Amino acid sequence: MGLLHVILLAIVQGFAELLPVSSSAHVIVAERLMGMDPTAPETTLLLVMLHTGTMLAVIVYFWSRWRRAFLQNAADLKQFVIALILATVVTGVIGYGLIKAIEHVAFPGKPHAWVEDLFGRLDLIAAALAAVGVLILIAGLMEKRAGATQPSTAQVNSKQAFWIGALQGVCLPFRGFSRSGATISTGMLAGVQKARAEDFSFALAVILTPPAIAREVWRLHQTQHSGLVALNFVPSLVGATFAFLAGLVALKWLSRWLEAGRWYLFGIYCIFAAIVVAFLYHAGY
């Protein structure tokens, strides 16, 4: 793949990853339109490196907010850590179970089945985009309807962490089902303050990204493509840098719209995107 392709995909990834519109769906569609194979090892490796760039953007952008929100005293820190651990464990159980179930059903008898082999399916992406769009729309409209009277908690409790982790687990095997869109919306519906739901969602993203990278490296090893890691290191590093810069811009946009009560607009966009992706699927992409 050319360096221009890498930079374009990095910008798409950086913006879409940190907005609740599913970066994977946008990157996969962009790859299709550029004639690339989204399931090829080199492209999935690039996607993992782009995720690394956006993870660093999350850390840079949210560190001061996490410090103010969760690290001011021992009690807040303890609750924050417990909620993160609980949500991550629930994500792992549900996500791993779904991945194994899908691999078993979609690839019966295949010795090294990987759910990633389905990531290029535009029909599945369209359905996932529509589903998360409806979830974001419901959360946004309910928040607007409730307004200032909506009860909300300043910290994420165990029950809220469980549901956020559960929805994050559902996101793992489905490209198009935006992780940030699902987790922030679930937090809002569960009664978490909007800003705290955003803070908690992206703290979970930082925890989730390293295992995702490790899984992809292991998949390359299992499929005897581990040499691609060294071969594509420099282009992937360039992509990660551009994804980092685009991610910082996207995070400012996200926070501004969330606080301004425009969350539901992301839901409308996801539903529109689902229609576009479905059209591309029927057009033969």
Image: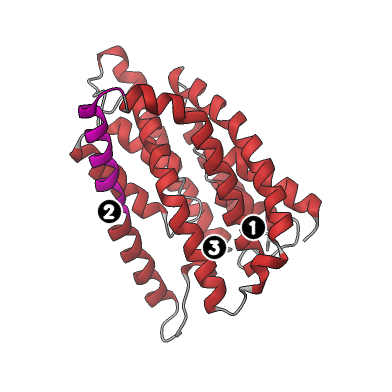
Counting other residues with Cα less than 10 Å from the Cα at mark 1, is it few (<14), some (14-19), or many (20 or more)?
many
What residue is at 46 percent from the left and 54 percent from the top?
210
What residue is at 41 percent from the left and 87 percent from the top?
109
Q: Which residues are magenta?
A: 72-91
Circle number at residue 234: none
User: Residue 174 in the image: x percent, y percent?
Assistant: 45, 57
**Secondary structure found at label 3:** loop
Main secondary structure type of the part rendered in magenta: helix
Q: Which quadrant of the figure contains the C terminus?
A: bottom right
Q: Is residue 76 magenta?
A: yes
**Secondary structure found at label 2:** helix
Counting other residues with Cα less than 10 Å from the Cα at mark 3, is it few (<14), some (14-19), or many (20 or more)?
many
Quadrant in the picture for residue 236 = bottom right
Circle 3: residue type = Phe
Mark 3 → mark 2, Cα distance in angstroms: 24 Å
* Nearest to the observer: residue 66 or residue 143: 66
Sequence-wise, the earlier of marks 3 and 1 is 1
Q: Which quadrant of the figure contains the N terminus?
A: bottom right
- Residue 59 lies left or right of residue 163; in this view the side is right
From the image, tell me which residue sits under label 2.
89
Circle number at residue 119: 3
Sequence-wise, the earlier of marks 1 and 2 is 1
- Whether residue 11 appears in this view of the structure is no
From the image, tell me which residue sits under label 1.
46
Q: Is residue 80 magenta?
A: yes
Q: Answer above or below: position of 206 versus 281.
A: above
Quadrant in the picture for residue 141 = top left
Q: How many numbered marks, from 0 up?
A: 3
User: Residue 176 in the image: x percent, y percent?
Assistant: 50, 51
